[in-house]
Image: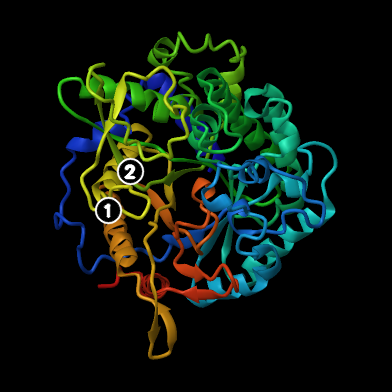
Amino acid sequence: MRTRSRRRLRWRRRTGHRRSTPSEGSDIVSQGTSDYRDSGLEFAPDFLLGSATASYQIEGAATEDGRGPSIWDTFSHTPGKVWNGDTGDVACDHYHRWESDLDLMAELGLEAYRFSIAWPRIQPTGRGPANEAGLAFYEALVDGLIARGIRPIATLYHWDLPQALEDEGGWTNRATAEAFADYARILGERLGDRVAVWTTLNEPWCSAYLGYGSGAHAPGLMDGAKALAAVHHLNLAHGLAVSALREVVTNDPGFSITLNLHVIRPSGETGHEAARRIDGLANRVFLGPLFGDGYPADVIEDTAEVTDWSFVKPGDTELIAQPIDLLGVNYYSTVTVRMWDGVSPRVNADGHKDMGGTPWPGSQHVEFLEQPGPYTAMGWNIDPSGLEDLLIALHGAYPEVPLMITENGAAFDDVVTEGPDGPEVRDLDRIDYLRRHFTAAHRAMARGVDLRGYQVWSLMDNFEWGYGYSKRFGIVRVDYDTLERLPKASARWFAELIRTRRIPE
């Protein structure tokens, strides 16, 4: 697989293959029902079906067994940053309940489990020798998954940066990327004979722009120049980590990164210019370096008043462009944009919590229009056509890169009722959401997209970042008072899909 990936990059440089972008997919015409509620669709036996979580959102045990503080510990304990003052101190207590959680995964028939590793549980300050208790926890987790026939997909970074590294500048500091490679090497040496897929980063867009630009995520800064420096150092961290892992793993895993690429719809005469700018910041600033094209010249020009990009050093783009075996795709909703006229009130419905800053440095004259409904509890529009468009566009741009949906799901205001067998959650809205998005994925595959699997977000209700425990994405309900798990109707629906390989009616 890795040899083929290297050939892929050489082929692209030689042929000058044109790169389409997710914002260019909106004119694609789908086949099937217009509402994406097709019937009888089946998935091949090797299509990998599973679910996903993240360490800070579920583990708890924030100060146990040598774990150091992360930026999310600091952020969530800062008044006014998280709804209701919620923190991940206990979360779902997965750290103590992992065995029963794995039993639940096996009961549902999951074929894969995408989890993240808490960096401060491995290196409490982000540097130095490994914390044996932290390594032992993830080793037991991986062994438990394998014993139950579930493939481990390990994400190295899902936003819980050690606070000690943030105190030195965090992702604005090149040294953080170098430390990340050392962290990756530690995990590769310990788990590199068992993990099926290594994912370096989850949604670096969020880490950079929401963490350092808008203030909505930890560490809560509002500085466009720092956000763009973080973009680069996260990209660099990915490349360095892949190189480090390759040197030490002994099985034949896949190497990947997960991106939350934006599906951008232009509106009106100025919509295409607005879409170009946002596509640059949201998508091409990651895809370009990742696949050997470097940073887009128009993005550098658009942000010239924000930063001079001097943090990019000679040779960095070559370090970033390590061959990968799989590109992870997270998808939830779309955005619609146009240029702001500077007179009318600026609309900013980009789907992200407003804390005062902007996640779009250099694009203050772009406005994000309200999306047509229906909506999830997050206020995000439900548009399965966006997922199909995104997969088709990525396949058109990078036809030799296999894809996997690493997150897709929805938060709804679930209600617990008393059923014939006890308490139940009949989350029919979530079932409908999943059915329509699985249909979108199936349509993309029928049109030639090399899609290898689908990991539903999320396995269980959890700490939803700046929204605390107010939003529930899980197919398994968690009672935050008793920590009891209750599979929802959507979990049973998904189990049926896995068992039959067919989207249930």
- For the residues labelled 1 and 2, the Cα–Cα distance comes to 9 Å
**Residue in the image at 79% along x and 57% along y:** 64
Residue where numbered disc 1 is placed: 440
Picture coordinates of residue 397, whole percent (x, y): 34, 32
Graded by Cα atoms within 10 Å as few (under 14), some (14 to 19) or many (20 or more), the crowding at tag 2 reads: many
Front position in the image: 15 or 151: 151
Left/right placement of residue 280 relative to residue 124 reads left
Tell which residue pokes out farthest to the bottom in this image.
420
Front position in the image: 65 or 400: 65
- For the question of whether residue 275 can be seen, the reply is no
- For the question of whether residue 112 can be seen, the reply is yes
Picture coordinates of residue 72, whole percent (x, y): 63, 44
Picture coordinates of residue 245, whole percent (x, y): 68, 40
Could you say whether the residue bearing mark 1 is in a helix, strand or loop?
Answer: helix
Above or below, 113 against 7 in this view is: below
Above or below, 135 against 219 in this view is: below
Task: Please identify the quadrant where the C terminus is shown.
Answer: bottom left
Mark 1 or 2 closer to N-term?
2
| Type of the residue with mark 1 | Ala
Asked whether the residues under the numbered discs 1 and 2 touch, taking CB atoms below 8 Å apart as contact, a structural biologist would say yes
Front position in the image: 122 or 357: 357
Above or below, 300 against 57 in this view is: above
Rendered image quadrant of residue 70: top right
Residue where numbered disc 2 is placed: 391
**Residue in the image at 79% along x and 39% along y:** 125
Left/right placement of residue 134 relative to residue 398 reads right
